Amino acid sequence: MALRWGICATGKISTDFAACLCALPDSEHIITAAAASSLERAQDFSERFKVTKAYGSYSDLAKDENVDVVYVGSINTKHTEQIKMMLNGGKHVLCEKPMCLTVKEATEVTALATEKNLFLMEAVWSRFFPAYQMVKKCIADGEIGQVNHVQATFGINARTVKRLLSKDMGGGSIYDLGIYPIQLAQFIFDEAPSQVVAGGFLNQDGVDEMAAITLKYSERKIASLACSFLTNMPNEACISGSKGYIRIHMPFWCPTRITVKDKVYDFELPEVPFEFNFINSAGLTYEAQEVRRCILEKKTQSPVVPHSTTLGFAEIIRKLRNDLGYKLDED
C-alpha cells in the first residue's frame, strides 16, 4: 500500500524531503498534495515533483481526503499551529525539528495526537541512519566499555540568515543546531539529565547565537556540547568509554562514517537523482520509511523518537533558554 503524503510548506528542507519520497517506490510512497503560503509557490513545487494537488492554503491540505500523512517543513513558529490543523483534519504528521518551541506546545500536540489516535513524530532524522544504529550496537556489544562522556559540536557561520537570528521566526542556535548534539546525548544515555547548564551569547533580538552546553547524568555520565551561528566548528562527535571511543565523523547529524577504536565503518547513502539543498539529505529516506512502517503497523509513535523523547528535548531546551535569558511569550 502506498502512503499518500501531503507537504506542508515548500521551502528548502521540504524540497529535499520530497525528492527523497520521489526516489522511493511508488508502491510505498507517493506525494498527492502540497501547500504553501501562496498558490504560485505550491504550483511550482507540485510541477517539479509531479504532485496532483497544489494548495495556497494549509487548511485546504488538512481537508484533502487523499492525504494520509503530512510532512510539516515550515518555520519553527508555525509548527504547532500546523500540526494541530493536520491532526484535526485526520492526518498523521511528521514534523521537522524542533517540533515545538515550548514544553506547553509539545504537550498539547502530543496529547492531541493521542486523543485522535494518529501518528505524530518529530523528524529527528539522525537516529535512522545506519551509522547511528552501528554506534548503538557497538556500545551494546561492549566494544568501548562503560560510556561516560559524549562530546559534539555543531557550528556554522550563519550571521546573515535572518530566520535563524529572529525571535519572531523561532530562531536560535540551540533550536536549529543544538538540538542535534542534544539528541545524540539523549540517544546514547537514554535518560533525563539531572543537571542542564548553558552559557552563551544572545543577539540584540534576544536569540542565542552561540551556546556551550553541559548535560549531567547518573553514574558519572556527562555530555559536553556546543552550537554556534558565529563560527565553523568541527561538527563531529565523540562517544568515550572505559575501553576506547567512537568517533562520528562530520557531519555527525547525518553521518556516513564512524570510527570505533581503530576500525572504520563506511555507509552508503540511498541513491536519489536530485540536487539537494543540505548535506546528505538522501538520508531523509530512512525516516520516511520509518513513518510508513509505523503507520502500517497502526502505531501512533515511533519507538525511535517517541513522544516522551520530544517532550524531553523541549524540557532540556527550556532550561537552556532560561540559563541564556532567551524568553518567549509562551513561557
Image (tube, rainbow, N blue to C red):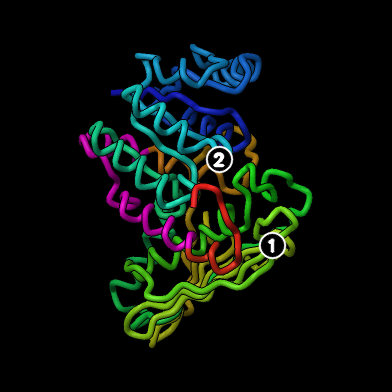
Residue 31 quadrant? top left
Q: Which quadrant, please, contains the N terminus?
A: top left
Relative vertical location of residue 1 with respect to residue 185 in this rendering, above or below: above
At label 1, counting other C-alpha atoms closer than 10 Å, the crowd grade (few under 14, some 14-19, many 20 or more) is some
Q: From which residue to which does the magenta span run?
A: 289-318
Q: Residue 67, can we see it?
A: yes
User: What is the secondary structure assignment of the residue under circle 2?
Assistant: helix
Mark sitting earlier along the chain (1/2): 2
Where is residue 328 drawn, in percent x and y?
56, 51
Name the dominant secondary structure of the magenta segment. helix
Residue tagged by mark 2? 77
Residue 62 location (% of width, % of height):
41, 20
Label 2 environment density (alpha carbons within 10 Å; few <14, some 14–19, many ≥20): some
The residues bearing labels 1 and 2 have C-alpha atoms spaced at a distance of 19 Å
Q: Is residue 228 left or right of residue 141?
A: right
Question: Which residue is more in the foreground, 266 or 67?
Answer: 67
Identify the residue position indicated by label 1 in the image.
202
**Residue 59 % position (x, y):** 46, 19
Looking at the rendering, which quadrant does residue 132 occupy?
Answer: bottom left
Q: Is residue 140 left or right of residue 316?
A: left
Asked whether 113 or 263 is in front, the reply is 113
Of residues 261 and 53, the one drawn nearer to the viewer in this rendering: 53
